[in-house]
């Protein structure tokens, strides 16, 4: 098994903010709440820690205050330490503003990468929900003497869904021989999970060349345009994964966690997903409450009907209220006899008594943080 203390982890907090603009108006994608008590960053961060990577940098860009509050010094992930540990890397830009892509972001943190003693760098965005062991991936990279190893998953996607993804053609030897960036095609495809293993020295060469040529996109300028100059391998991840690239995928991915089999695979007890602990009281259910097929976090108070929902910490459901097919973020208050169906409420939303909100599975209603409806 690979020596994972030889691997530097880099997580890009803002790389896909544009795909879910409602959720990222006030926060980075990495700090978007997910699954009743987690944030998106918890998944790549926990995966790295569970894979024995002990030096991790989170590359920020903007709207990162809630991310800093969430991860803190990294105590929850055992990353508050004198050597290695968690590093929050603030945004830097060029003369035209903040960085435009992954290559440009890495050029601004090049000293952090250069000074690290690691031989390999694991790059990951914060847009994928999965429980992944990176150790066999680094092994695979070493054994194949690859320049870049791309982690991918396979699934069926519509043309609209493919327009946010990088699609790979992989042969029987696990070599990537074609790369399509945001194509408008439908069918069963290999999609990049935006996770890459690269030798540190090779990555630094790529960064230096990108600086000299004003290149910024890792997928387009490296994977696609230089594919045949390098040995790019594909590592297939066979477990369940959710790629959050729209409100639709965010809503449906949360809802899939209601399935115990999927939930058990994502939140594997042998490789847990860690998050910031809030020490809330247990959920409280009123005498007339009725809850079915839902995930309910600690601190909730439910006195109405809840069906097929994901409730975050501190949500309050009033008497006679009916809430179905909803995602209610932290401290949402639903008034008495209100009715919600296919809705997403951000944090600290108040739904008035007798109010009715209804969307559809494809187009759920979204209520902004702190709104009173």
Image: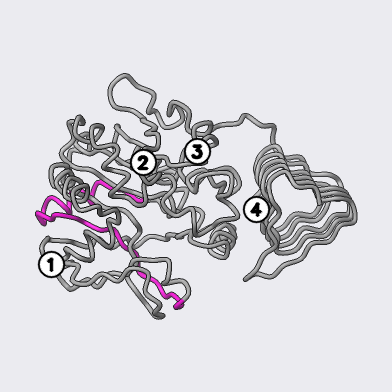
Asked if marks 3 and 4 touch (Cβ < 8 Å), the reply is no
- Tag 4 or tag 3, which sits nearer the N-term? 3
Tell me the CA gap for discs 4 and 2.
38 Å
Q: Are marks 4 and 1 in contact (CB under 8 Å)?
A: no
In front: mark 3 or mark 4? 3
Q: Residue sitting at 13 percent across and 56 percent down?
A: 146
Distance from Cα at disc 2 to Cα at disc 1: 30 Å
Task: Give the quarter of the image for residue 22.
Answer: bottom right
- Residue 141 in magenta? yes
Say which label, 3 or 2, has the lower sequence index.
3
Mark with earlier residue (3, 1): 3
Find residue 58 and report its horizontal and vertical position in percent.
38, 38
Per the image, the residue denoted by label 4 is 310
Which range is magenta? 132-159
Looking at the image, do the residues carrying marks 4 and 2 touch, with CB atoms under 8 Å apart?
no
Residue bearing mark 2: 93
The residue under label 1 is: 228
């Amino acid at each position: 098994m690979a020596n994972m203390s030889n691997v530097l982890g880099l997580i890009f907090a803002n790389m896909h903010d544009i795909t879910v603009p409602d959720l990222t108006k006030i926060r980075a994608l990495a700090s978007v709440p997910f699954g009743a008590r987690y944030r998106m960053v918890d998944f790549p961060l926990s995966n790295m820690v569970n894979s024995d990577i002990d030096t991790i940098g989170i590359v920020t860009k903007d709207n990162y205050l809630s991310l800093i509050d969430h991860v803190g010094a990294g105590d929850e992930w055992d990353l508050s330490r004198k050597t290695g540990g968690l590093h929050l890397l603030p945004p830097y830009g060029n003369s035209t503003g903040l960085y435009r892509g992954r290559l440009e972001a890495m050029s601004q943190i090049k000293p952090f990468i250069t000074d690290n003693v690691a031989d390999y760098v694991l790059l990951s965005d914060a847009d994928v929900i999965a429980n992944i062991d990176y150790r066999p991936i680094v092994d695979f990279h070493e054994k194949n003497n690859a320049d870049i190893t791309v982690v991918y998953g396979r699934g069926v996607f519509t043309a609209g869904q493919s327009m946010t993804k990088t699609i790979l053609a992989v042969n029987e030897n696990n070599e990537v021989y074609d790369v399509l960036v945001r194509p408008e095609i439908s069918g069963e495809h290999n999609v990049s999970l935006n996770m890459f293993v690269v030798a540190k020295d090779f990555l630094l060469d790529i960064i230096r060349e990108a600086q000299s040529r004003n290149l910024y996109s890792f997928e387009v300028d490296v994977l696609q345009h230089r594919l045949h100059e390098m040995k790019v391998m594909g590592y297939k991840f066979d477990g369940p994964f959710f790629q959050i690239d729209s409100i639709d995928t965010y809503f449906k991915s949360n809802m899939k966690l209601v399935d115990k089999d999927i939930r058990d695979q994502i939140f594997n007890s042998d490789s847990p997903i860690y998050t910031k602990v809030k020490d809330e009281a247990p959920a409280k259910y009123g005498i007339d409450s009725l809850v079915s097929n839902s995930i309910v976090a600690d601190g909730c108070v439910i006195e109405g009907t809840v069906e097929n929902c994901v409730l975050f910490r501190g949500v309050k459901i009033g008497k006679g209220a009916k809430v179905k097919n909803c995602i209610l973020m932290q401290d949402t208050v639903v008034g008495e006899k209100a009715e919600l169906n296919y809705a997403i409420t951000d944090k600290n939303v108040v739904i008035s008594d007798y109010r009715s909100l209804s969307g559809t599975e494809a187009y759920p209603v979204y209520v902004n943080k702190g709104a009173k409806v």
